[in-house]
Image (cartoon, rainbow, N blue to C red):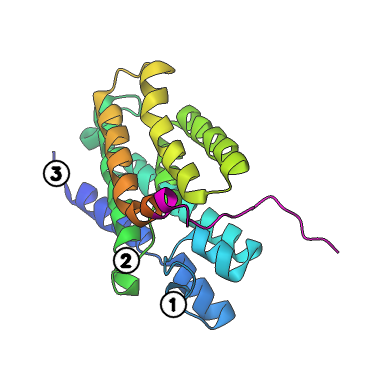
Amino acid sequence: MISIYSISALILAYLFGSIPTAVWLGQGFYGIDIREYGSGNAGATNTFRVLGKKAGIAVMLIDIFKGWTATNLAAFIGLSVTGPQDSVQFVNYQLALGITAVLGHLFPIFAGFRGGKGIATLFGMILAVHFQAAIICVVVFVVVLSISKYVSLSSIAAGFSFPLSIVFVFHSPIRSILLYGMCICVLILVTHQKNLERLLRGSESRVNLFKRKKN
């Protein structure tokens, strides 16, 4: 059922996702366009590389919040449209809003449709839809990153852990969540194509987000 509320929520979700956190932070506080440095990506990882941990953490948290907020707009559409919050219909609306926010992050209207890879925004969406599976994604990301030092590989592994945990750990009866999880895997592979090529060549940049600087 389509209503003015659901359409408005989708528009808001896209606008939330379109907030170019890395671009605005880089231009506002550092006087640079983050897309012209490092990997050229307007996301948290490139912000870590170019602007440092403080800026990177700020971008990551805001981008996560974008996805979480947009997905939770489903709670404001109305029960007559979405049904109760434990219903399949409600989860489907959450997924639609979250995916719209991710598209906004990938193609932001406020930054010439040149956005990031959407990993942090995707994670915010997962937090809103399935908190327990999101925790597993975090654990997988941290473990892979601590071992490999590749953010791209860690993001891919974390993304693939979502549908696997939905099926084998939580046994979710909602098929749309599993379908969404599979779409996440495809999206991550597409947006990380260049990273995968560099990983295969052995030329992908390593980072150590947990290393402390020596005095």
User: Which residue in the protein does label 2 denote?
Assistant: 108
Residue 83 visible in rendering: no
Q: Amino acid at mark 3?
A: Ile
Q: CA distance from mark 1 to mark 3?
A: 41 Å
- From the top left corner, tell me how far across and down residue 40 is, in percent: 42, 70
Instruction: Pinpoint residue 118: horizontal percent, then vertical percent.
Output: 38, 53
Residue in the picture at 54% in, 83% down: 31
Identify residue type, mark 1: Glu
> Mark 2: few, some, or many residues within 10 Å (few <14, many ≥20)?
many
Of marks 1 and 2, the one in the foreground: 1
- In the image, taking residue 70 as reference, residue 180 lies left or right, namely left
Determine which residue is flagged by label 1. 36
Indicate the quadrant where residue 51 lies.
Answer: bottom right
**Residue numbers of the magenta segment:** 198-215
Work out whether mark 1 precedes mark 3 in sequence or the reverse, and give the earlier one: 3
Residue 194 appearing in the image: yes
